[in-house]
Amino acid sequence: MALAVPGIVTFYELHPNLKRRKYVSVHGNENLADWRLTIARLPARQIIKFTMFTPRQLPVHRQHFAILQWRLFSSVRVYPAVEAALKEGRPVVALESTIVAHGMPFPQNLELSQRLAFILREKGVEPATIALHKGDIKIGLHPDELHELAESGDAIKCTTRQLGLFLANQKSPFWGATTVASTMLLAHQAGIQTFVTGGIGGVQRYGQDTLDISADLLELSRTPVVVVSAGIKSILDISRTLEVLETYSVPVVTYQSDEFPAFFSPHSGVATPARCDTAAEIAAAFSLNQETFGLRSGMLVAVPNSSPAGEVVEAAIQNALTEAADQCITGPAVTPFILKRVAQMTAGESLRSNMALVENNAAVGADIAIELAQQKRGKVKGPSICSGKPRSRVVVMGGSVLDYIAKPTNDLIIGTSNATLTTESDGGVARNIAETLGRLGSRPTLYTAVGADARGSAMLSRLRENNCDVVVAPAKTDQRTPTYLAVLNRDGDLHVACADMDAMKNIEPLDQSAMEGVDILILDSNPPLNVLQKTARLAYESGVKVLWEPTSVPKASILSKDDKFLSYLSYATPNFDELLAMDTSNTDLEKSRVCEMFSKKLTSEEVLAFLSEIMFRVVNRMDDGACLVVTLGRNGIAMVKRSRHDKNPECSHFLTDEIVVANATGAGDSLTGAFVHAILLGKTPEEAVRLGAQAARLSLECSGAAVSPEVSQLIIR
């Protein structure tokens, strides 16, 4: 939330010696979220007082001061991807943890959470599931933490009044699950304006007698957050709930409907207080309330449930309510009775409909968060790289794949079962290159495609943690995340591989806006052929240097037949076999002779004698000044540079030390990423190859990942 008018922001930190010292004081228009993140990074278990005084933009006779205090007795842990999004002004959507811990059984609760994250990230929005964990307030969860919460089964439901009690109780279980009310409060304190849930609480049936009214309504009256839901749960008294919200001056709108929804059903028979047809309209109304009129309430956005199963569930609810009345069930016993009977009558339809409506809410909430971010910053990263300027000097386009690597413990025997060491890791040529660049500090933008499943969403979430921006091509609902199965030989070299890359068909060519501010575009060969050709041509015509990673021998052979495509390239990084495939003038006899020679350990003179002519032929088909880098396994790395003024390219060879290979699947990609990182820093191609060789060595020695985490420690001199 940006302060609308000049004010005063002051922090105090209470040290163990109880001497209070001013931490920082700032005057003027500031981004409140940035200061809250500053607080969150201070040492845990210190008491911090945060006070904001800001005059509202009202007539002088009504002018007064708002005071906000945040006392933290426990540490606030903001997930790195959420923190980065808030600091950069990108949209973030809060998600409650009660829906994970108590809303549905495992593993459906985990699948829903992963699906919500995918829906949000597909639109360029960062999800932030809020929970309490081991005395910490968590703003955003790591995928492993989300899995633990979903599977725990003993998380305590914590509404606003229970937050302090839970955190102070040392005997509490590890997990505390936040409700609608407590999620709103913590989201607002973290600077998040949009919150997506299933449905909110309200006035219970017969609430006029029991005074059973949800704390969600009170929190909506005092916490400025847009709450996107499927309305009020239909087991509650919808009319009386709307009356309470009116009394509390909470704006209530229905998205694209004149009838307020009944959670499972779009029809309640109750007219909506207001209708909004676009996310922009909702965001504008919310901002006017906060900044122009100084209201401190939230806004409830009700999104009608479009799932056909919803009507069946709603009919079951009405039948259950009739049964409850016939059996004289009243008060607190009504809700559990209805839920049990609905589950029995619908045979699981209520769960499926519940999941569908939350996903629908997430899509609408993402659009609202984007509009709010646009209003605050004037621009926002959208769902496609084609719609905005990349924030990086390097864009990587191509495959993100789940790698399954099987390495036999003895010599590989064809036609029978082999004992192997099998690992699963994140892979894909473009993804590996992007991770290497991110670990080295270049912050690339990766344009890729994954399936509409939890595995793809989790993989991209891990990539964002490694300093990479990710843009995902839209996927079909039944599409799988690409997978790559590699069988190695005993020495760790590739014996055979199988790839399921159907999702790559979703990648489309980049447009002109995607080239603005970019120095290097890296292409692997996984996207469709026409997409690679169009994107390479556009980059070339825009003055962007293009690097091509051939990816496989068949793809290297196909694309190398296109002289135009090769002429757009400033760099190419094939391995030995891919180089031979790129040389279309090479005869099978010559290729066979060269392959036989390279099965041995060669000296630099022998390498250059056998490869220089082939490399010259390939690089001369590339752009003026192009550089061709060829990985040769045990024979090191060969490089040839095409001079702009000399028709005789310079060829050089780099020997590498003998190492024990644990995994060769990401070594070449690590080399390519480190090579580009060095080029971006202004290093010579020779210096870039040496850094690439170091990165490749680390990844060759790493058995648990395609790209070694130790790449982050490399220093270029």
Image: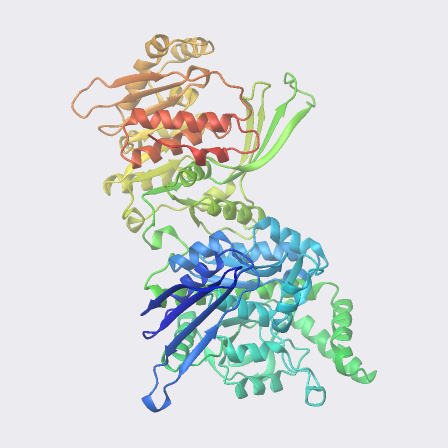
Residue 330 location in percent, x, y? 78, 83
Residue at position x 27%, y 40% in the image: 544
Residue 696 location in percent, x, y? 44, 27
Q: Residue furthest right?
A: 327
Task: Report whether residue 1 is seen.
Answer: no
Q: How many marks can you see? A: 0
Is residue 233 rendered to the left or right of residue 274?
Answer: right
Q: Residue furthest bottom?
A: 61
Residue 197 location in percent, x, y? 57, 67
Q: Is residue 547 above or below residue 467?
A: above
Residue 589 location in percent, x, y? 40, 10
State the residue in front, 214 or 314.
Answer: 214
Q: Quadrant of the C terminus?
A: top left
Residue at position x 30%, y 37% in the image: 680
In the picture, residue 205 is in which quadrant?
A: bottom right
Q: Is residue 369 above or below residue 247?
A: above
In the picture, residue 304 is in which quadrant?
A: bottom right
State the residue in front, 402 or 601.
Answer: 601
In the picture, residue 165 is in which quadrant?
A: bottom right
Is residue 192 rendered to the left or right of residue 245?
Answer: left
Task: Report whether residue 288 is seen.
Answer: yes
Is residue 153 rendered to the left or right of residue 484?
Answer: right
**What colouring does the structure picture have?**
rainbow
Q: Quadrant of the N terminus?
A: bottom left
Q: Is residue 123 above or below residue 178?
A: above
Residue at position x 52%, y 25% in the image: 701
